[in-house]
Image (cartoon, rainbow, N blue to C red):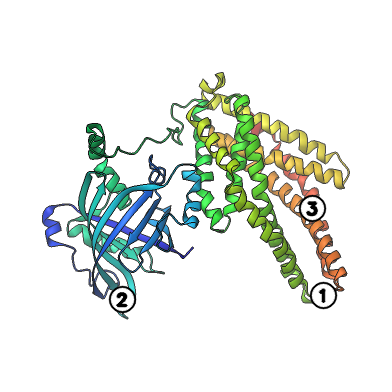
Amino acid sequence: MADTKREIERKFEFTKASAARRGVPDLTGTAAIAAVSDQGTVDLDAVYYDTPDHRLAADGLTLRRRTGGADAGWHLKLPVSPGVRDEIGAALSDTVPVELSALVRSRVRGAALEPQVRLLSSRKVSHLLDADGALLAELSTDTVRAERGRATAAWTEVEVELADGIGPGLLDAVEKAFRKAGLRVSDAPSKLARALSETEAQAAAAAEAGTGAAAGAEPRALPPADPGDGTAGAYVLAYLREQRDALVALDPAVRRALPDSVHQMRVATRRLRSALKTYRKVLDREATDPIGEELRYLAAELGVDRDQEVLLERIQTHLEELPRPLLVGPVRGRLRTWNNSRRSGSRRQALAVLDSARYLALLESLDALLAEPPLRKAAGGRAERVLPQAVLRDYERLAGRVEAALAMEPGGERDVALHEARKAAKRARYAAEAATPAVGKPAKRMAKAVKEVQSLLGDHQDSVVAREALRGLGIQAAAAHEPSFTWGVLYAREEALAERGERELPHIWAKTSEPGLREALE
C-alpha cells in the first residue's frame, strides 16, 4: 500500500449562474489566510470502479483510477465522519490493486469491480497560506464532465481541503465567506455521488431504448436501522442491522491494523450472536442458530489476536508499576520476544479469516436474514412488552451462574464458573442495550448494572489468563538462565487482584440483584 492520508475537506457549489460567472472570491484576510497562491490548472481523468449495483457508493466509498496531477494512481476513500475521509493510494496499474480490493471485500464479496463512471476535470488549484507562508489549505475549482455510458452531466464545484494539522474552524470561516459570494455547501458527498445522481435518469432511459448501458442494478433491500412500526420485530431487526453494518465497516479497519479495530469488530460479532439467542421468540432459531455458530467461530478467530493484545497491555502496565529493585533481569526483552512470537501468527490468522470464503458466506447469510427475516408470532407484538421479557430471561440466566460460582470454594473450578458468569453478564448487558431504544430507562439501568458485574468478572478472567502467561514466561526465563524473580512477583500480584475481585463480587451482585431493577422491566 503506497500511502494513507486523512482528508478533511468541504465541497461547495454556486447557487446562481451570476455567482459562477464572478467565480471564487478572494479569501485573503479570511481567518488566518494571509495570501492565496495560484498553482495553475491541471487536467484529471478518473474512472470510478464499483459493483454493478453500486455497493461501494451506497456505503459512501469511492474507488478510482486517476491520471493527471501529482497524485496519479489508484485511490480508495473510506468515510470517517462527515467531511472526513481516509484516502489510501496505490500505484497506477491496469487492474484494481490487490491491497485495495481487500479493503472493500466486505462490501463487494463475490461481485466484480467494474468501471462505472468516468470524470474528466479541469482543476484550477490555489494554496491558502498563513502569514509565514505555511500551507493552510488547498482550494480547487473543478469544471467536471461525467460520462456514464451515453449519459453525461457537467457542473462546476469548489473544494477546500485542509493541510495536515489545521483545524476545521478554517473551513467554517471559508464557508461564511463563500455564502456571501453565492456559494453553498454541496448536497452531494462526492463527485461520484453527484455523477450517479445526475446521470441515473439518462442511463435508465438509454437502457430502455436499447441505446446505452443500463443503470446500476438495485442492491438487495435491507431494512433500515430504525424501529419502523414499533413492533418487537422492527426493533430487533434495527439492532441487528446496526451490528451488521458495524461488522462490514470495521473489516477494512482490521485489515489496516487500526487501533481497537479488532476489539470493536469482535464486539459487533458478539452482539449479533447474543441478539439471535436472546430474541429467539422474535426470530426463528432454526434459521438463526447456524448463523450464530458462524458468528461464534468468527469471534473466536478474531479473539486470538485481540486476547494477545489485551494480555500484553496488562502485563506491560503491571511491569511499569513495579519499583525498580523488583525488575531483575532482561524482563522487557523477554516480554517483547514472547509477544512477537505469538502476535505475528495471530495477526496472520485474523487476516486469513477475513479473506476466507467462510467469512464472506457469513456476511451473505446476515444480509439474507435481514432481507427476509424468519419472524415468529412475538415479532408482531409491541416492543415495550416483548423485549423486556427477553432481558429478564437473560438476567435469570446470569443470576444462576453468579450464585453458583459464589457458592464454590476458591480455585480452578470457581475460576471456570466465574468465567461462565462473565459470558452470561455480557449477554444480559447486550440484551438490555438492544432493548433500551424501545424500553428506555429501565433497560438502560439494567445494562449499566450488569456491565459493572461484567467488568469485574472480566478483570478476574484476565487475571487468570495473565497468571498462566506469567508462569510460562518464568519457565522460559529460567530455561535461558535468566532470573525469574520478576515474573513471580507479577504472578503473586495477579493472585491478589483476583482475590480482591472475588471479595468485591458479592457486594456488586447485591446491587445488581435489587428487585427494583427487575420490577421496572416487568
Quadrant hosting residue 358: top right
Q: Residue at (49%, 42%) from the top-left corner?
A: 110
In three-dimensional space, the C-alpha distance between marks 3 and 1, rounded to whole angstroms, equals 23 Å
Q: Which residue is mark 2?
A: 130
**46 to the left or right of 154:** right
Q: Position of residue 209 (x, y in %)?
A: 22, 32
Quadrant occupied by the C terminus: top right
Q: Position of residue 331 (x, y in %)?
A: 77, 71
First of labels 3, 1 by sequence position? 1
In three-dimensional space, the C-alpha distance between marks 3 and 2, rounded to whole angstroms, equals 56 Å
In three-dimensional space, the C-alpha distance between marks 1 and 2, rounded to whole angstroms, equals 54 Å
Q: Position of residue 250 (x, y in %)?
A: 53, 49
The reply to whether residue 522 is in sight is no
Q: Residues within 10 Å of mark 2 (few under 14, many from 20)?
A: some
First of labels 3, 2 by sequence position? 2
**174 to the left or right of 320:** left
Q: Which residue is mark 1?
A: 328
Amino acid at the residue labelled 3: Val
Q: Which residue is mark 3?
A: 464
